[in-house]
Amino acid sequence: MSRITITVNGTPQTRDVEDRTLLVQFIREHLGLTGTHVGCDTTQCGACTIHLDGEAVKSCTVLAVAADGSQVTTIEGLAEGGKLHDVQQAFHEHHGLQCGYCTPGMIMASVDMIRRHDGMLDEHTVRHELEGNICRCTGYHNIVKAVLDAAEKHRAAHAVAAE
Amino acid sequence: MYATTYHKPKTLTEAVELFESSEEPSYLSGGHTLIPTLKSRLAAPAHLIDVRNIPDLSGIEVTADSVIIGSATKHAVVAASKEIKAAIPALSGLAGSIGDVQVRHMGTIGGSTANNDPAADYPSAVLSLDAIVHTDRREIPADEYFQGLYATALEPGEILVRVEFKIPEIAGYAKFRNPASRYSMAASFVAKHRDGHVRVAITGAGNEGVFRWPEAEELLTENFSAEALEGLTIDPSRMMGDMHAPADYRAHLVAVMTRRAMQNLGGTHIL
């Protein structure tokens, strides 16, 4: 057992965990934040994608104890004051989901993608960069539209900020 | 996953002492091979020694002749490094082709090189770029480092500290991936070194893991063009055959990928 503190969605969370506890188990079972999903449990499907110190990672393949002292953002941490994050809003407007199982991971991966490219995305890049997230409903078209829309909003917001 | 005890040493000495004093220890880096292995209970180390917080294992240095990468450096960091991209664009492109974005945010060059998975990308660059593998106790030339499937010259407890790649005159990397796993089914890293000699390293295909292809190297040293490879084939009995691709198909892919690497010098060609 180890006592660890991980700051999740801005709140430091201290728990005693077995060293073999996966970060996704810590998030779901120790903190009760079940928005992060487990799909394949083999680092392939991306449903468990969260941000670890600002970068998208698959939380089924990180030990919670190795994330001690880190900052984690989950799907629950994106909306602010009841207002959806731009990427969440875009997924809503473009119906970027069918069953919804992959959606939290898709959104976390997309937020990371828009950040890394500073919103400069085209369809080809979005499709390529989503290769670590699998939608078994195969509803990729609307997901891609949603990411491109959110990327455009990101660019517009930054253009305004720059003026 | 079976129960295990996690350690986070701050120095190389501390890490090696922990390894030597522990029953059934294992080093842990990015964990993107090891943790899935533990989860499926194919391995059950009693002690996990996480080497990522050891300062000696981090950092990128580019000199006139070489690119030196600390073993705890993540694939995403290698792929994004402007210095590496300027010196060896094929190496930068290779790093950016590993797994997917999330995997590249965790996986490390040292972990990949120490594990020596027969379908991993980095071993081909290490071998083709005539790299030197620096450990906590010695320097190992690439030609002596790889010793078959998942086998390397590393002794138990030895830590891979950094990899020193020779900057070639030009290099190219071509990979044909399994569309589901995204691991290579055949990939070829071709480098023409500054002294004129050519090294061709193949990963993903060989039944002994990464290997050099001397026949291709000889032809390319004489005439450094894709056309020089026309008609050259490789013996399928040396290839892996599995549910994803039989050996003769992999042998065919090796020749095609080597030609594609030649057609994409100064970069990568990822299928």
Image (cartoon, coloured by chain):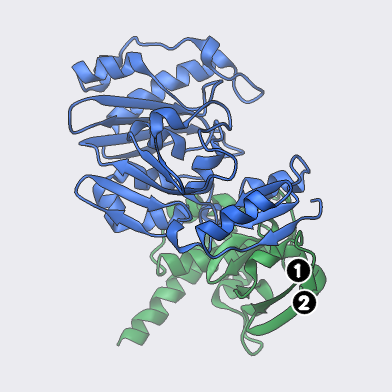
The three-letter amino acid code for the residue at tag 2 is Arg
Numbered mark located on residue A26 in the image: 1
Residue shown at 30% from the left, 15% from the top: B229
Residue B111 appears at what percent x and percent y? 53, 47
Residue A123 visible at all = no
Instruction: Choose between A111 and A146: the one closer to the eye.
Output: A111
Colour chosen for chain B? blue
Residue A76 appears at what percent x and percent y? 69, 77
Residue shown at 70% from the left, 66% from the top: A64
Using residue A25 as the reference point, say whether residue A82 is left or right of it: left
Instruction: Choose between A16 and B172: the one closer to the eye.
Output: A16
Numbered mark located on residue B57 in the image: none
Q: Name the subunit of mark 2.
A: A
Residue A73 appears at what percent x and percent y? 62, 74
Cβ atoms at labels 1 and 2 below 8 Å apart = yes
Instruction: Choose between A42 and B48: the one closer to the eye.
Output: B48
Q: Is residue A74 above or below residue B130?
A: below
Q: Earlier in the sequence, mark 1 or mark 2?
A: 2
Q: Which of the image's four quarters has the C terminus of chain B?
A: top left
The residue pinned by badge 2 equals: A15
Camera-nearest label, 1 or 2 = 2
Colour chosen for chain A? green
Q: Is residue B146 above or below residue A92?
A: above
Q: Is residue B129 above or below residue B199?
A: below
At mark 1, the secondary structure is: helix
Instruction: Choose between B222 and A151: the one closer to the eye.
Output: B222
The image quarter in which residue B240 lies = top right
The image quarter in which residue B174 lies = top left
Residue B4 visible at all = yes
At mark 2, the secondary structure is: strand
Same subunit under labels 1 and 2? yes
Residue shown at 75% from the left, 39% from the top: B42
